[in-house]
Amino acid sequence: CSSGHYDNLSAGSGMEMDDRLSHLEQRVQLQEDEIQLLKAALADALRRLGCCEDLITTTLLSVISTEKSMSTERLSTARREMADSCSRTTSTSSSTCGKRDRMFLRGRPVTMHVPDQRRDSYSLDHKVALPERKLKLQWVYGYRGRDCRSNLYLLPTGEIVYFNASVVVLYNVEEQQQRHYLGHNDDVKCLAVHPDMVTIATGQVAGTSKDGKLLAPHVRVWDSVSLNTLHVIGMGVFDRAVTCVAFSKSNGGTHLCAVDDANDHILSVWDWQKEKQLADVKCSNDSVLGAVFHPMEANLIVTCGKSHLNFWTIEGNTLTKRQGLFEKHEKPKYVLCIAFAENGDAITGDSSGNIYIWAKGGNRISQVVAGAHEGGIFSVCVLKDGRLVSGGGKDRKVVLWDHEYHKQSEVEVPEAFGPVRTLAEGKQEELFVGTTRNAILQGSFSGTLTPIVQGHTDELWGLDVHPSIEQFVTYGQDKQVHLWDTNSHQPLWSKVIEDPGRSAGFHPSGTVLAVGTMTGRWLVLDTDTRDLISMHTDGNEIISIVKYSPNGAYLAVGSHDNFVYIYAVSEDGRKYSRVGKCTGHSSFVTHLDWSTNSQYIVTNSGDYEILFWEASNGKHITSADTVRNLEWATSTCVLSFNVFGIWPDGADGTDINAVCRSNDRGVLATGDDFGKVHLFSNPCSQPRAPSHVYGGHSSHVTNVAFLHDDSHLISTGGKDTSILQWALA
């Protein structure tokens, strides 16, 4: 297996490069924004010229006269506001056409029309109350196995503990209950359980707060029964991320060691109860994949990783290194995992598929199990009875070895769940297996391995809820479509599509669903059988939205090619024929809603336009009177009069990725770029409206949707690939 492959699998190895790329992307984005503004202004002018030619009507004259009637003072204010490219302000103006509201995003004016019924009573100064209802995290779908290790353990409570995004999950499989530790504010990367089997330590990455401040990487020590935080360690000490953490075992667990993701991968030792650092040392220039205390020698720590196995002795405030000597044995590119036998021997698994036994007290190999696995060995686990279990990468095998390291039994992880990432002993003969495809399986050597936790493995945007039952669909860039049951928290089915995914939408009957890809293709699947019903291509760019009309007679397909394609739908969602193409946006289509009568569409775009369309032919509607008082079946457009209060001061127009309205129309939920889910009162048409704020995701929240009965909200994470289920009460 290539070094690059293991680099990819080693925790956080690409973070530095990601940071640089992210910085460059931001700079490019700023330049693109400026170009986009110019493009948008040009498109707007061309569109207005077109309107003048087509529609020299009294309505148009009225609109023009309204624009002219803006006082010079208002115009200069608008110019001043536009000059401040990051400001976001709101103003209201009246005209013979009716009342309009205007906000500014990145200097771009966004005009919204006030419905007649709110025209007289509406005031910008009116205050909106916080919603009475709140969200409570109920379920976390998925597990972070793709780039973390040693992150799955069984607690005496019968719960398995692991993490995903910024949440540490305690999952009682028998009772189908989850509890959540929510003390972290960004990605959790490592986890250790104290010898008392109650105290837990978890380490996280450096994050960025909403106002751009750096959130320091640190370790949190907490009680797994009460979920109370006991200590916070290493604020301002660690660099980039904490990738390994472990408690000492033989001295009552008074010490804790941690390795960060600095260039030198600093190994530090702490008295965690006093939050005091005792020693630190440069561990390795290359990635460090494991750091553990010896179970019998309180002052011995063993670390492993790329090209190394090191034995560290703690003396006072210094750490002294002895390198593991491979001598005549094959030296692997990576030592991937460490465990300890009952007699104190160290056991390592490596990228060459060999298991090496290192005699207690020394740094030499005393026994070899050559070719224990085909490909790398990602996890070794010593059972209570002293036997060893090893988990393979390439071969996906879990192998049981006796006390003399002879193979006794093996079981294979199904290909769909990927290589073994980590192993944990359960009750009796039971075993838990975490995989690199973000699944956790449960089973034994006498039976099979069955998934108890599943999730996506790449960025996730596509989400929709079933119109009448407790199900939702997700479609990610990992090419996976999952139909989930919100009660069992398991997929009812999964399907691999040829292309990475971006969007999903149920037909109102619930019998079929559409999914949009990142390549211009969109597909219709049977909800029961997952069979492909039809496949279409519109352009070759991202299909950002697929949304059926409330009566099921149309499907709107919004694309990053700036167009919306409208299809007539017949035979209960099984037949499609294109009836229109909405042309007029000067940037990619981001959001779309249908009117309740299924006759009109409203869209938002990447340059903050709000445009309206006739569904039957895709014709652009320019008359405000036609659309001002329409009732919308959903509220997913992030720019509209009823939701503009969701935007905070200084927002750049891309900060909020998704909004949705509860079916009883009482609340709005949003997902933002800072990993937060917000809950607002609906309507939300006052500037800077107050909200309840919830963490859990560790990257941008890409989508939010209420279940048909408003009992729960589903939110999806982008880079963290997670799905969170919130109870609304």
Image: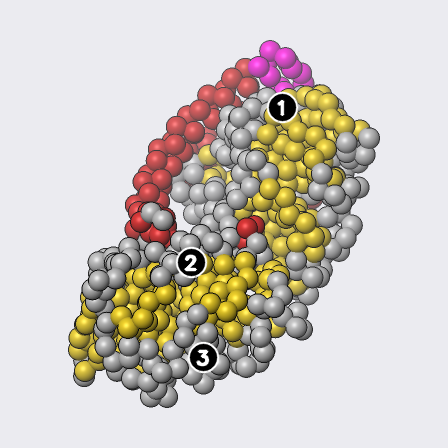
**Residue labelled with disc 1:** 582
Q: How many marks?
A: 3
- Residue 166 lies, with reference to residue 553, above or below; the image says below
- Residue 88 lies, with reference to residue 149, above or below; the image says above
* Depth check, front residue: 290 or 64: 290
User: Can residue 404 be seen in the rendering of this structure?
Assistant: yes
In the figure, is residue 722 to the left or right of 194? right
Q: Position of residue 615 (x, y in %)?
A: 71, 27
Mark 1: few/some/many CA within 10 Å (<14, 14-19, 20+):
many
Disc 2 secondary structure class: loop
Prevailing secondary structure class for the magenta stretch in the rendered image: helix
Q: Is residue 717 magenta?
A: no
Q: Position of residue 59 (x, y in %)?
A: 67, 21
Disc 1 secondary structure class: strand
Q: Using the numbered discs, state the Cα–Cα distance from disc 2 to disc 1 in whole angstroms.
A: 57 Å
Q: Using the numbered discs, state the Cα–Cα distance from disc 2 to disc 3 in whole angstroms.
A: 20 Å
